[in-house]
Image (tube, rainbow, N blue to C red):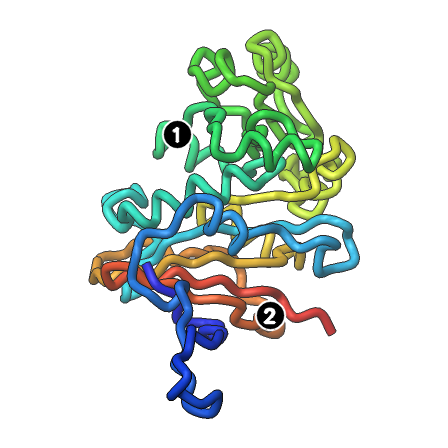
Amino acid sequence: MRRLFPPPTATPAETSAETSADTSVFTDVFAEDREWGLDELADAYAYPDPPYGPSGVCLRANMVSSLDGAAHHGGRSKPLSSDADMRIFGVLRGLADAVVVGAETVRREGYRPARARKAFAERRAALGQGPVPAIAVVSASLDLDFSRPLFTEPLVPTIVITGAAASQERVKQARAAGAEVVLAGAGPSGRVDAAAVVTALKELGHTRLLTEGGPTLLGQFTAAGVLDELCLAVAPLIAAGDAKRIVDGPGLAEPEQFALASVLEEAGFLFTRYRRIYQ
């Protein structure tokens, strides 16, 4: 893995008596093509403190896309992924207070509880975080299998975020399985309000948020204007077909502006990070 952006920071190498300062050789270990350690990746992807925007929360999305814009292949993101992508996936989880994901993605990808990793234990403890991020599942219908390990075996309770019209019987089943049920949206449509999701998680003490989609949920966060950062892995693959883009939702009145923060590369995969520009 090597860093392409920001440009490598030059540091003078050791120079001999015959080498003047004007002709010093410059080196940067981050420009080298090598495997990065987890601590290095965690530093590179650390959450901003304080958050960029006015909400007091940083909502980061982590998505992968093919060269032609497909967010999945055959209904799953794994065919577009790589070993480096999965390392970064693990690091982003290791930094987050909560991982927010849509119900359809939970079903398709077979979500399981986050697992504790020794590599992040000291960092999380220093920030007052639990041993793992909570998984927060967004579902208006609560069409979820509450017998799955995601609900019955997590180190910290899984959060289920739903709307006011949710079936009370399904709410009881979720709570009986050990999930924490949170309402985010009181409208008659029964839909979950994306902005209310962020507010509800903040009230639970979760301010470093990571969403892994899918595209429909990311579209809702984008439309609500609450997405602060996008980590997008671009795979050197062509998928064709009719797969969704990473953001699937109604068009915005004006495109939201983001600034490039960093680019890493490994085996042709580009790992980009964009930060929202607040006017």
Quarter of the image with the C terminus in it:
bottom right
Q: Give the image location of residue 187, x and y in percent.
A: 73, 39
Label 1–label 2 contact, CB within 8 A: no
Identify the image quadrant of residue 26: bottom left
In this figure, what is the number of numbered marks? 2
Lower sequence index among marks 1 and 2: 1
Residue ID for mark 1: 107
Rendered position, 215 above or below 229: above
Give 24 or 236, whichever is nearer the viewer: 24
Identify the image quadrant of residue 222: bottom right
Rendered position, 254 above or below 217: below
Secondary structure under the numbered disc 2 in the rendered image:
loop
The residue drawn where x is 45% and y is 73% is 8
Q: Residues within 10 Å of mark 2 (few under 14, many from 20)?
A: few
Quarter of the image with the N terminus in it:
bottom left
Q: Is residue 69 visible?
A: no
Secondary structure under the numbered disc 1 in the rendered image:
helix
Identify the image quadrant of residue 186: top right
Which amino acid is tagged 2?
Glu
The residue drawn where x is 46% and y is 25% is 115
Which residue is at the far front? 17
Which residue is at the far top? 176
Q: Is residue 71 visible?
A: yes
Q: Give the image location of residue 257, x and y in percent.
A: 59, 73
Q: Give the image location of residue 74, x and y in percent.
A: 23, 44
Q: Residues within 10 Å of mark 1 (few under 14, many from 20)?
A: few
Which amino acid is tagged 1?
Arg
Residue ID for mark 2: 256
Give 193 or 135, whichever is nearer the viewer: 135
Rendered position, 173 above or below 45: above
The residue drawn where x is 45% and y is 45% is 214
